[in-house]
Image (cartoon, rainbow, N blue to C red):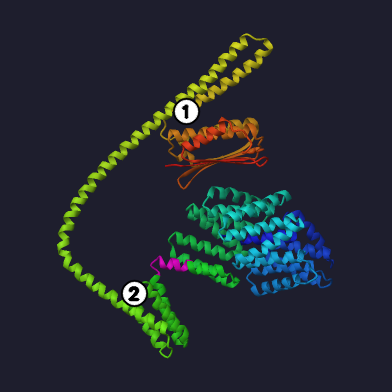
Amino acid sequence: MSIKSSFFGICCLVCFSVSAQQSKIDSLEIVIAKNNSDLETVNAINLIAVEWIRKDVNKAKTYLWRAKTIIKTFPNDEALSSTYSNLVSLYKNTAQLDSSEFYLNRLRVLSENPKYRVNSKIQANYASTAGLYYKKSGKYKEALVFFKRSYDVAIAKGDLLSASGQAINIGNCYLGMSDYNEGLKYYIIALNGFEKLDNKAGQSFCFNNISECYTELKRYSEALVYLNKSIKLKKELGDKRGLANAEQNLGNVYKGLKEYDKALAHYNTALTINTEMEVFTEVTDNYFAIGQLYAEMGRSQEAISNLEKSKAVAIKIDDSVQIISAELEILAIKKSSEQQIVSENDAILNLKSLQEAGRKNQEAAGYKNMAEYYTNRKQYDKALEYTNLYHALTDSIKNYAIQAQFKSIEEQYNKTNNEKQIELLQKDKLLIDEKLKQQRFLVILSGVIFLFTGIGIWMFINRNKLRQKMKEVELRNQIAADLHDEVGSSLSSIFMLSKMAANTTPKNQQTILSKVSDNAHETMDKMNDIVWMLKPSENYGIGLKERMERFMHDLCTIRNIYYSFQANELGNLRLTPTQSKNVYLIFKEAVNNAIKYSNTKSLDVTIEITNKKLNMVICDEGSGFDLKTIEKGNGLNNMTSRAIELQGKLLIDTSPHMGTRVALSFPMG
């Protein structure tokens, strides 16, 4: 999980109300270029330093030292607190822990001055900075306390920007603690605030972290949708560090999809960017993710190498959680591979080094650990050997606990050996008698298994053939009913309208004939669909893809609507006639509704296969509607019924003025 860079970016948004657009940077540089020693210049320096922390650490440091120098000429605690906050983040990111702690303490002392009230900007600044500091040290619970305090202050002051920033920080803490529901709740709060402010930087962080929630929940399609939104905004803003974080998250998604080469490429890109920028808080995450990926690929040596690098960087930046995580991952890999003997040899060499150095206490502890290790593995002879070494080294210390353990190991060792001897004798005695019985039994059993297996396979094949034929008969009956109901009713309507045209005035005839034309065109479309469904095909997926794309192109072109249709995998699928029919009719109904009623300017359709499921998502940016108040017609009910027939789920996510998202998911088996 990679959420650290978003913490820093949001902290910047909270404390300094920064816009990442180039025009803002240019105006700040104009103020700074005047070389005035006043509050306006210091504030401009702090604002622009935030931008350069994400792009050029050394340049940011130069700006902040200049701000400190100017503040000495006129005391201003609010400006000083902003400078301290920037320096804490800068030094923490670059693993200069002493400097980071020094400025955090300066900021704390400044906030504790009795003349500043509880809801002052300085105290809020300290709470936000301290929360970020503890988060980067892997202490989520401590960070959460500070972020909630800062959030409450922002709400009390009516500061929407600060409240939105702290909401995303709180969400990040919950995400780090795997409480995805709480995390998502605060991300939505933050996103609503940033959208009201038209703050693209804040929106990009929200989209990115919502994507992380979906990734953790293994809902990769939704994760990619939000991640692509985040990447688009980060590119507009020129947020190089944010793009590195997005690359890390892309790696997580492709790892979940088992596309390891893509995942590794994205992880390495993120590592390269963060290493160049000296953002060590992210570098440790990059190495950790690469190590986990190699472990999943079965490449143990490369996995351990990268996890060791993650641990080394974590030690450098004092991230205790990351250190423990890396150690546990390394231990798990060694236990699950043939590397164990190497680890044992390394432990023996370490004991020899301690012996040569005269470190007897550490040597004794090493013997104790080795004894416990072999006891857990039930290698009681080796456990006894190391317990004896421990006992000999500590013979002047009356450690009754160790003596009791020694006795227990010895008894267990003897008991195990005795049981093995008895078991071997019994097996030797029974082996000859049982051997012939087992051979006869195996011959009979093999024949029975072979017979029943053959019968089972025959029944299974015939049952599947019968089931498939029944499905085809059922489909054709349904299509016949559709032909009677839909096409029959349309032809009846045309007939009635023609009679009316013959008995009405010429003025009304034009209107009636127009309706006849529309009904005839609709009937042709229905007939075309029915013929296509009836037409035998080895692969309904190819025809379905072409038909859907043509239908969407025709409707969107007429209405001058921008559309996107992505369904590369659809043409390779072998869909059944029932699946093909229901997918097409759900698609057709959703697209028709979007074009007719939503007033959308764009329409996106994505069809992909994930975990042996077909996922179809249709999104528009139109007016949306309220599902609770709208009267559901045959269209929505038919879509739901067809999804149930596919043994899948249909979700409609919409609200007034927020567009509509229709998502279908069903198993391919």
Residue 336 magenta: yes
Up the image or down, 158 lies above or below 595; here it is: below
- Pick out the residue farthest to the top: 503
Disc number lying in front (2 or 1): 2
The residue nearer to you, when weighing 495 against 410, is: 410
Image-based side of 398 in relation to 607, left or right: left
Up the image or down, 107 lies above or below 586; here it is: below
Q: Which mark is residue 532?
A: 1
Residue range corresponding to the magenta coloring = 329-339
- Pick out the residue farthest to the bottom: 396
Image-based side of 573 in relation to 1, left or right: left
The residue nearer to you, when weighing 127 against 622, is: 127
**Predominant SS of the magenta segment:** helix
Up the image or down, 272 lies above or below 356; here it is: above
Is residue 277 at least partly visible in the picture? no
Residue that carries the numbered disc 2 in the rendered image: 379
Q: CA distance from mark 2 to mark 1?
A: 70 Å
**Residue type (three-letter) at the residue carrying disc 1:** Trp
**Residue type (three-letter) at the residue carrying disc 2:** Gln
**Is tag 2's residue or tag 1's residue first in the polypeptide sequence?**
2
The residue nearer to you, when weighing 512 against 540, is: 512
Is residue 376 at least partly visible in the picture? yes
Give neighbour class at mark 2: few <14, some 14-19, many 20+ (Cα, 10 Å): some
Mark 2 touches mark 1? (CB < 8 Å): no
Q: Residue at x 50, y 66 (%)?
A: 306
Up the image or down, 438 lies above or below 532; here it is: below
Q: Which mark is residue 31?
A: none
Q: Residue at x 45, y 24 (%)?
A: 480
Which percent across, then down, holds residue 618? 57, 39
Helix or strand or loop: what does disc 2 sit on?
A: loop
Helix or strand or loop: what does disc 1 sit on?
A: helix
Which percent across, then down, holds residue 189? 66, 52
